[in-house]
């Protein structure tokens, strides 16, 4: 069934009638945790998605999605009141002739005559539908646009093609920097400011579609060659989007070991496909999980079916990336795609379908806004019931506007009730109220009641296999 954002509006109106959250007798009691809003951990840059490889064009109706449904899909991804309110859009730079990963056109498809020859750029104003999507995202309030190249044009590389690996020729590094900045300038003339640029994607992999290899040592040299050009354009340089988090750690360590390179990289970026994002990268700079979606062979809309690519699996991955890896950004792969996609939304001709993966991400992204900071929080996990550790996982955040957010994931099958001692707030030890939202098999970031803080303590009830979001005013 097509999911309409209008149902969320009905739910919001009904929320005013909901009672205060009170523990049920059936839930097992847990000795509570602690949240200290005065202990700041990593800053939060935002949550995002990508529509590279013509997926933006599909969202814009290339396979029949109706204008009405195009708007509903945009609302689901970008609307802060009824959808996910995602705040980072990752754009794909480059070209590929692979029939599965049909990508955008290169802005310089042919060799201009060498690295020192005057460039001959081309711009179609569309970029595989990404220009349209970027303009729409800007209207929803998105300010962070990350443009990333899967490969340099083939004539700049050792293998002569954008696909199948190969590496960037040393003599083309300066021209490649100019190429990347020119791409950003084309978007600027369309009214969209590219804030972040990446020169490589998964440099540790060779693929049949656009790909380009670098060792960590080679990446360091490229960073030093192209970084000054990117920075002079007022754009952040990001590196290196390795396919695994441990693999990215090797790139980050090499960059940090070279002071000239370390000064050029604003954000270290990695993917958890090969190894999970479960520990900090070896850098004091900000880090982003810049692409991931779970593996799987079918389209799946479930919250919790044991498939490992359901909504709960995504919620756990987000928690781990924020809590254990200390990432400041979380950028999912496709927001919307076709077929047996693990994207958040499946496009189906004129229609679309929504997975609970979207709502797992929305529970975080709608309420934890750019500029927030993660704060110290624990679930009282060493107590539990009868000495057994609780299955509750907690993170907490303070937004710039003062709103405080708790994200509480109960991975166990049984409901539990617990409380948190809240510290470090403007009403430290006092009373406060807020809203409670639930995401599980029957709820999709649905308001289920009102949170009440009494004497600095917040009591919450957590159904089994659920994500509870508490937003305190």
Image (spheres, rainbow, N blue to C red):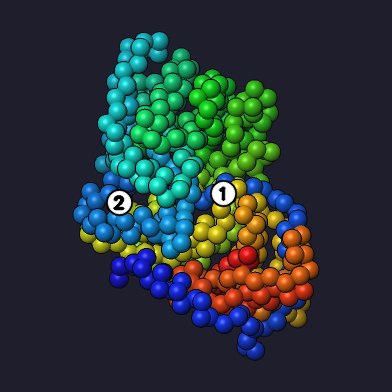
Label 2 to label 1: alpha-carbon separation: 25 Å
State which quadrant residue 117 falls in: top left
Q: Residue at x 65, y 57 (%)?
A: 402
Q: Which quadrant holds the C terminus? A: bottom right
Q: Residue at x 36, y 68 (%)?
A: 6
Q: Are marks 2 and 1 in contact (CB under 8 Å)?
A: no
The x, y position of residue 105, in whole percent, is 29, 32
Dot 2, how many residues are within 10 Å of its Cα: few (below 14), some (14-19), or many (20+)? many
Q: Which quadrant holds the N terminus? A: bottom left
Foreground residue among 291 and 350: 350
Q: Secondary structure at mark 1?
A: loop
**Res. 340 in view:** no
State how many labels appear: 2
The x, y position of residue 379, in whole percent, is 70, 68
Tell me if 284 is positioned left or right of 170 in this view.
right
Circle 2 residue? 59
Foreground residue among 217 and 144: 144
Tell me if 455 is positioned left or right of 452 in this view.
right
Q: Secondary structure at mark 2?
A: helix
Residue extending farthest to the left is: 64
State which quadrant residue 320 falls in: bottom right
Circle 1 residue? 370
The x, y position of residue 53, in whole percent, is 33, 42
Q: Is residue 439 above or below residue 208?
A: below
Q: Is residue 152 above or below residue 322?
A: above
Q: Which marked residue is nearer to the observer: mark 2 or mark 1?
A: 1
Q: Sequence order check: which comes first, mark 2 or mark 1?
A: 2
Tell me if 264 is positioned left or right of 302 in this view.
right
The x, y position of residue 308, in whole percent, is 48, 64
Q: Residue at x 44, y 25 (%)?
A: 181
Residue extending farthest to the bottom is: 25
């Amino acid at each position: 069934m097509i999911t309409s954002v209008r149902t969320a509006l009905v739910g919001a109106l009904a929320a005013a009638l909901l009672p205060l959250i009170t523990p049920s007798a059936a839930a097992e009691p847990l000795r509570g945790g602690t949240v200290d809003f005065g202990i700041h951990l990593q800053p939060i840059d935002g949550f995002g998605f990508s529509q590279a490889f013509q997926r933006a064009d599909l969202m814009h109706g290339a396979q029949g999605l109706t204008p009405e449904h195009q708007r509903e899909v945009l609302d689901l991804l970008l609307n802060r009141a009824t959808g996910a309110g995602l705040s980072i859009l990752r754009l794909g730079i480059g070209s590929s002739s692979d029939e599965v990963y049909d990508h955008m056109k290169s802005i310089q498809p042919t060799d201009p005559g060498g690295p020192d020859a005057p460039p001959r750029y081309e711009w179609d104003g569309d970029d595989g539908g990404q220009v349209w999507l970027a303009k729409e995202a800007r209207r929803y309030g998105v300010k962070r646009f990350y443009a990333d190249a899967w490969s340099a044009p083939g004539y700049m590389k050792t293998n002569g093609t954008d696909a199948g690996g190969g590496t960037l020729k040393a003599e083309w590094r300066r021209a490649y920097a100019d190429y990347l900045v020119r791409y950003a300038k084309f978007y600027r003339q369309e009214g969209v400011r590219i804030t972040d640029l990446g020169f490589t994607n998964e440099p540790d992999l060779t693929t049949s579609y656009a790909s380009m290899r670098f060792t960590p040592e080679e990446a360091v040299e490229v960073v030093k060659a192209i970084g000054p050009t990117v920075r002079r354009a007022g754009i952040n340089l990001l590196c290196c989007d390795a396919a695994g988090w441990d693999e990215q750690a090797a790139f980050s360590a090499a960059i940090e070991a070279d002071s000239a390179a370390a000064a050029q990289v604003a954000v270290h970026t990695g993917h958890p496909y090969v190894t999970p994002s479960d520990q900090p990268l070896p850098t004091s700079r900000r880090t982003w999980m810049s692409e991931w979606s779970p593996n799987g062979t079918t389209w799946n809309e479930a919250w919790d079916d044991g498939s490992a690519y359901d909504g709960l699996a995504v919620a756990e991955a987000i928690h781990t990336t924020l809590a254990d890896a200390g990432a400041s950004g979380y950028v999912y792969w496709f927001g919307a795609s076709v077929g047996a996609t693990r994207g958040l939304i499946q496009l189906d001709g004129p229609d679309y379908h929504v997975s609970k993966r979207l709502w797992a991400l929305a529970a975080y992204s709608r309420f934890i806004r750019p500029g927030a900071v993660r704060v110290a929080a624990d679930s009282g996990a060493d107590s539990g019931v009868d000495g057994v550790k609780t299955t509750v996982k907690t993170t907490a955040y303070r937004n710039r506007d003062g709103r405080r957010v708790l994200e509480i994931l109960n991975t166990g099958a049984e409901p539990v009730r617990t409380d948190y001692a809240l510290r470090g707030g403007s009403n430290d030890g006092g009373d406060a109220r807020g809203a409670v939202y639930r995401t599980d098999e029957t709820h999709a970031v649905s308001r289920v009641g009102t949170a009440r803080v009494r004497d600095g303590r917040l009591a919450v009830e957590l159904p089994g296999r659920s994500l509870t979001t508490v937003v305190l005013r």
